[in-house]
Image (spheres, helix red, strand yellow):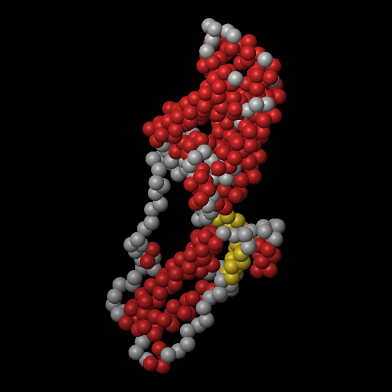
Amino acid sequence: MKLKAAIIKEFLLLIRDRVGLAILFIMPMILIFVMTLIQDSAFKTLNEKGIPIIVVNNDPDSLGTDIENGLRASELCTVYDSVDGKPATEELAMKAVAEGQFLVGIVIPKGATEAVRKNVTQLVEQTLSTDSILSKSTLPDSVEIKIFIDPITKKSFIASVTSSLREFISGVKTKIMFRTFADQIEELIPDKKKTPLNAFDQTQIIKYTEVYASKSIGKIVPNAVQHNVPAWAIFAMFFIVMPLSGSIMKERTEGSIFRLNTMPSSYLTLITGKIIVYVIVCLLQLVLMLSVGTFFLPMLGLPVLDLGHSFTGIILISVATAFAATGYAVMVGTLASTEQQGAIMGALSILLLSALGGIWVPTYVMPQMMRNLSAYSPLNWSLEGFYELFLRGGDASTVTLAAVKLMVFFVITMIVAMVINKVRRRV
């Protein structure tokens, strides 16, 4: 009955604070919408997918066609052949890249395929010919493909684009060489059955298969939604330090805590009522945030939040995070001497822990020193748990360690709060 009364008291105090409820539920939703929209293009660049490039193809032959079709078929980039509705030219492409409309511009010169064809043909003739005069002849000039680069473009992306271009050019050269050799052999051995021109396409010895190191059935790529929804949900859960520590401080300043202490109830019973109510609030916050990522963000053209394949794992890490956040709020409320002190201590500490924990910026883009520090943030333990479920296809067993660390953190914060409360009661 005492615990029930404490729960009802906390619930009534919470629902009467409409501003506090708005902060707890509406603020995280706004943060998810804003931060996801802001970071969407940044994550595309980070993952090197869908990067906008402009291609000016002045060679409608094999080389130009293979390069353009190859880039269009790649997930690496999104290919455009016009600027502001006008067919792209070298001048327009350079200007568009300079203005930041595209990260990379590629100009394929006219007659590029024919130059490659002449170059390869002469190489074949030199190889098969015994004429010393022919072998000393000068080869045609090499093909010059211009690449315009925005200064903000990552070097790894430039390397990927140039590597793809070399692959396309090498493929075209090999096909031409194969056909030239076939023609030369046919002239030398007229009775030999003519080699089919598409034989080269059937002689791919080495093939590449990309396999994600994950138990997940699909290919889940980290994006703005997969990061921001769990990240800001965790931030919202820990941000209950503001109303909960404020509630503890208010009871102390108004003197109600002294009346409660005169009742035949332990401190643990009184504080458990707060913990239960705010753990439920944290779980409601999480459900709301996950719903935003699943149903509302796709309406803005953003990816759908993939929740993985383990509902049990989500419950486990969510409950552990809720208890950790609540325990931390109780500890801050007990440590602080005034409401202003509690608000400043709680807000600044959560901002610091969230920055270290990878909420603002993913840890995998941090320098090594910051990644080492992030391992000590409880928000990072929770975020890594959600990453295991949402990105790596993990289950309850893979997030057990993170959940245990969060529950140990909760126990430690409660012990600290109880010790401080006992010392103050003696004073």
Tell me if residue 122 comes above or below residue 153 in the rendering.
below
Give percent across and percent down for residue 308.
Answer: 46, 35
| Residue 9 x %, y % | 62, 12
Q: Is residue 395 above or below residue 3?
A: below
- Residue in the picture at 60% in, 45% down: 40
Q: Is residue 283 visible?
A: no
Q: Is residue 97 visible?
A: yes
The residue under the point 59% across, 12% down is 261
Camera-nearest residue between 384 and 158: 384
Q: Furthest residue to the bottom?
A: 133
Residue closest to the eye, 12 or 292: 12
**Quarter location, residue 333:** top right
Residue 81: image location, x then y, percent? 62, 60
Q: Quadrant of the C terminus?
A: top right
**Residue 173, relative to residue 222: is it above or below?**
below
User: In the current view of this chain or complex, which residue is farthest to the front?
Assistant: 427
Apparent side of residue 217 relative to residue 418 in the rendered image (left or right): left
Residue found 56% across the figure and 68% down from its top: 60
Residues 282 and 158: in front is 282
The image shows a total of numbered marks equal to 0
x%, y% of residue 190? 31, 79
Residue ID at (47%, 26%): 411
